[in-house]
Image (cartoon, helix red, strand yellow):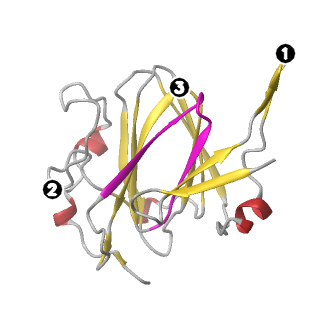
Amino acid sequence: MAFRIRALDIPEVKVIEVDRFGDHRGFFSETYSRKAFADLGIDQDFVQDNQSLSAQIGTVRGLHFQIPPYAQDKLVRVTRGAILDIAVDIRHGSPTFGRWVAAEISAENWLQILVPGGFAHGFVTLQPDTEVLYKVSAPYSPEHDKGILWDDPALGIEWPVSGDAALLSDKDRKQPRLAEQDIFFTYGD
């Protein structure tokens, strides 16, 4: 099995290519190996797996993050359907503060994305009945759960869905803008 890694325009956010071996029965893939990931410089201690199903195209989940001491690194993959995955740098003092990167992650391309702590994370579904699985490096903590408004104009995220067509939770519709957030992450910490 082999894993290949490449950084996006914000180098802390990485896309991971995973081998998939198929035959007449289907396929097999090793989607995570602690040792192989550590050999690539990814040495997070993942403590929880999460899964979501979004029935409709244009479902937006995010932009979410947890603050210290429960900040989460996330390793995201799609087992059915497709998403446009978004990571926003929210580390004050970072040369890329307030910038975002995106990658299409799908069951077909079998890519994964690593979003480290200090980034807000979200995605929009590109296909119906999309299932997303992701590992996190800290357990969910409601007291440390935060978010940024998904369509904050200061971020300029190029979502492939308009505000009227996006399907969001009430919570995600009411998130504050980045400029309204306290400083939770500082670059270099």
Q: Residue at x 58, y 46 (%)?
A: 112
Residue found at the far top of this picture: 24
Tag 1, which secondary structure? Answer: loop
Q: Residue at x 19, y 57 (%)?
A: 177
Whether residue 111 is in magenta: the answer is: yes
Q: Nearer the viewer, residue 133 or 32?
A: 32
- Whether tag 2 and tag 3 are in contact, CB under 8 A, the answer is no
Q: Main secondary structure of the magenta part?
A: strand
Tag 2, which secondary structure? Answer: loop
User: What is the quadrant of the C terminus in the image?
Assistant: bottom left
CA gap between label 2 and label 3 equals 30 Å
Say what amino acid the circle numbered 3 marks. Gly
Numbered badge on residue 154: 2
Disc 1 residue crowd, few under 14, some 14–19, many 20+, Cα 10 Å: few
Mark 1 / mark 3, whichever is N-terminal: 1
Say what amino acid the circle numbered 1 marks. His
Q: Judge depth for marks 1 and 2 and give the one in front.
A: 1
Which x, y percent locates residue 108? 59, 27
Q: Residue at x 23, y 24 (%)?
A: 165
Q: Which residues are magenta?
A: 100-117
Q: Residue at x 21, y 45 (%)?
A: 151
Numbered badge on residue 24: 1
Say what amino acid the circle numbered 2 marks. Ala
Residue labelled with disc 3: 81
Q: Judge depth for marks 1 and 3 and give the one in front.
A: 1
CA gap between label 1 and label 2 equals 49 Å
Mark 2 / mark 3, whichever is N-terminal: 3
